[in-house]
Image (cartoon, coloured by chain):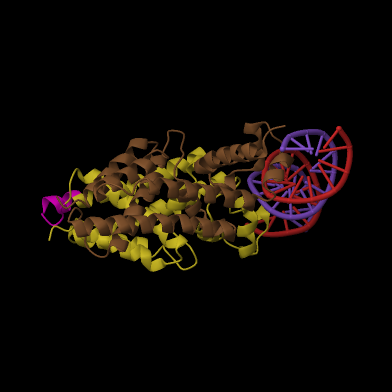
Chain colours: A brown, B yellow, C red, D purple
Amino acid sequence: MPDKADTRAQILDVAQHLVQVRGYNAVSYSDIGTRLGLRNASLHYHFPTKTDLGVALVRRYRERLEQTLGTLGAGTSVQRLEHYVDAYRTVVHEDGRICLCTVLAAEDSTLPEPMRAEVRAFLDLNEHWLTGVLDQGQHQGELRFPGAPAEAAAAFLATLEGAMILARTACDVERFARIARRTVDALRAA
Amino acid sequence: MPDKADTRAQILDVAQHLVQVRGYNAVSYSDIGTRLGLRNASLHYHFPTKTDLGVALVRRYRERLEQTLGTLGAGTSVQRLEHYVDAYRTVVHEDGRICLCTVLAAEDSTLPEPMRAEVRAFLDLNEHWLTGVLDQGQHQGELRFPGAPAEAAAAFLATLEGAMILARTACDVERFARIARRTVDALRAA
DNA sequence: GTCTATAAGTAGATAGAC
DNA sequence: GTCTATCTACTTATAGAC
């Protein structure tokens, strides 16, 4: 008699991994169940509909980011940016995994509305946090960039998202790190 | 008795539009046929397998880009970059369309191998052309950036791809143009 | 070239036994 | 909680008439 919360977490773990590689539409209950030794109906017990599963997936992903960003409150703006990039770098893997919400953003128009809202919330969280860091760095003279911090933050996030996609198609995980590094460097005032 | 090549082109037109919005995996023969008043079996006459359709789709898209880039050979490097961005801007629409290969790159791991090869060829074409323009601009003193032209080209392309995805999730087509403009400006030596 | 009809497979989802 | 069994809908794909 397995623990309910535990099984639920395992389902989310496997589902997240699969979605990060294949995308939401290309992952089925069967795919997830096979990897866990569970049947189709058992998954539906924990997540009645696929939308329920998808929403829970993105929500957990965002909550974890909130925790991570909470620990990145200290240090200079450059250090905070570098730790942020490091966190992103850990989700880019040899097996083709990239940021969950980058994949989902690409599928946006096919997602159920509750999922789209969660994906937007995740991206907004990133942009707002980045805007704060860039604003801090600009005022302290550590960072220099044209235009408003919010515009620079949007461009920065766009570059990271695009870099993950490029890295995957090129089967070159280092490509993400190279692009990310030069993008951080471009913001430095020095 | 419709012309065969004509029908084939119409199928590709409709399929491209749908894939740009939904992605390859979320578009079916039925979706395409309904919009053209054609039956499932008729589509299979023109494209025996879905892979055939997908490969033809990306190949035509790349050939068209080659023609477009051919007309962008004249002018200063900044002008060429701006025309390039303009060309990309025309594929970002209110209805959710973005660059075909940006969508396909996000689905990379689920695509049949012949399609993956075509997507890579498209992205390589972009990177090589951009590398040439950046190299030209650097030597002429019109552009200034750190590192090799190829590295700057990869970062530039990543930003455009990410910007398209962000623009779509935010339901804000202007967002792409704003990010693209600041990215071109950042390369200017002046 | 396009059609009807149909195959074979998979999807998300539910009922009810244990 | 997990199972077997089943349902309906949809997918890609093919056979053969017109």
User: Which residues lie in the magenta part?
Assistant: B135-144
Q: How far across and how far down the image is residue A101, in percent?
A: 47, 50
Q: How far across and how far down the image is residue A72, in percent?
A: 34, 46
Whether residue A51 appears in this view of the structure is yes
Taking the image as shown, residue A151 lies to the left or right of residue B78, namely right
Taking the image as shown, residue A117 lies to the left or right of residue B129, namely right
Q: Quarter of the image containing the N terminus of chain A?
A: top right
Taking the image as shown, residue B162 lies to the left or right of residue D12, namely left
Viewer-side residue, A175 vs A50: A50
Point 33% across, 47% down: residue: B125
Q: How far across and how far down the image is residue C2, in percent?
A: 67, 59
Q: How many numbered callouts?
A: 0
Point 37% across, 65% down: residue: B175
Q: Is residue B136 magenta?
A: yes
Q: How far across and how far down the image is residue B87, in percent?
A: 34, 62
Q: Quadrant of residue A179?
A: top left
Whether residue B74 appears in this view of the structure is no
Viewer-side residue, B142 vs B124: B142
Viewer-side residue, B1 vs A49: A49
